Image (spheres, helix red, strand yellow):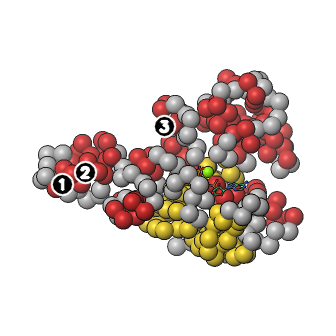
Amino acid sequence: MNYILKTEKLNFSYMDGTKALKELSMKIPEGKKIAVIGNNGSGKTTLFLHFNGIHRPQSGNIFYRDKKMSYSSGEIKNIRKNVGIVFQDPDNQLFSGSVYQDISYGPVNLGWDEKEIRKKIEEVMNQTGTFDLKDKPTHFLSYGQKKRVAIAGVLAMNPEVMILDEPTAGLDPVFTSQIMELLNDLNKKGTTVIISSHNMDEVFSWADYVFVLSQGEIISEGKPEELFRDAEVLKKANLKKPWVLDMYDYLLNKGLATVGDNIPRTREELLNLIK
Ligand SMILES: Nc1ncnc2c1ncn2[C@@H]1O[C@H](COP(=O)(O)OP(=O)(O)OP(=O)(O)O)[C@@H](O)[C@H]1O
Ligand SMILES: [Mg+2]
């Protein structure tokens, strides 16, 4: 297994003394769909901001493709190009006048030629359903629209790792499914995708591998079907068992469902196993 990002005993405190990450070590497998879950304030955003060099560890190390991050200006530039991050709050991401200008900011900065930029912007606007918004000033957009434009702007740079901090929070059900599908497609083309989410059903049906954060520490990690069956971890991190798994385990107990080759991850897969 190749690990694209690694942290080693990461510690980070904010200016007011809040210890946000404690001795945090984790390895992100390349080419997978990763979810980081945990309560409000458990450290997810702080961790993500370390992955593309926005925060620097106060002690400990971060490795990108086995190379220790040294934080030289050249390297920071390289990391920001390879590891794209969509912030939790889109107002922290968007700044240019129009949607089109905002989405094209990254590629323009990377110095691509005009034709190439136009083609890429068109592609990501179609992927994120933002084409009709292209001439609108970003400050007039609704929250969900801003979120989609922010995602488009990061997609436009073709990152190797795409990090999305609560990508579907505030999106309607249709766009939520579209964004998760889009993340699947990107992953199929080889992008490592890392999300945080408070929606356990979404995480369960989507992720290949899950990390659980609690008070700045990783308290568990594993495949979703194993991790979400660990009652102790769920209790410790105040997490809810995904409904599909909860229902499946109930039906199994009552002898009303068959044991499939794979544990059902979606409603459809569950229905197929009900006797
Ligand atoms: N700029 C800051 N100054 C001081 N403390 C901060 C700052 N940003 C975050 N924190 C604190 O660091 C801890 C981790 O916060 P973080 O935003 O990383 O959590 P989170 O898991 O992303 O939470 P949420 O689910 O609410 O987004 C919290 O205790 C928070 O209050
Ligand atoms: Mg957060």
As displayed, is residue 4 above or below residue 153?
A: below
Q: Amino acid at mark 3?
A: Ser
Element under label 3? Answer: helix
Q: CA distance from mark 3 to mark 2?
A: 23 Å
In-image side of 28 versus 115 (left or right): left
Disc nearest the viewer among 3 and 1: 1
Figure quadrant of residue 90: top right
Identify residue for label 2.
248
Whether label 2 touches label 1, CB < 8 Å:
yes
Identify residue for label 1.
252
Q: Earlier in the sequence, mark 3 or mark 1?
A: 3
Figure quadrant of residue 24: bottom right
Q: From the Cβ of disc 1, is ligand 1 less than 8 Å away? A: no
**Tag shown at residue 177:** 3
As displayed, is residue 143 above or below residue 261?
A: above
State the residue at coordinates (23%, 44%).
Answer: 272
Q: CA distance from mark 2 to mark 1?
A: 6 Å
Q: Residues within 10 Å of mark 2 (few under 14, many from 20)?
A: many
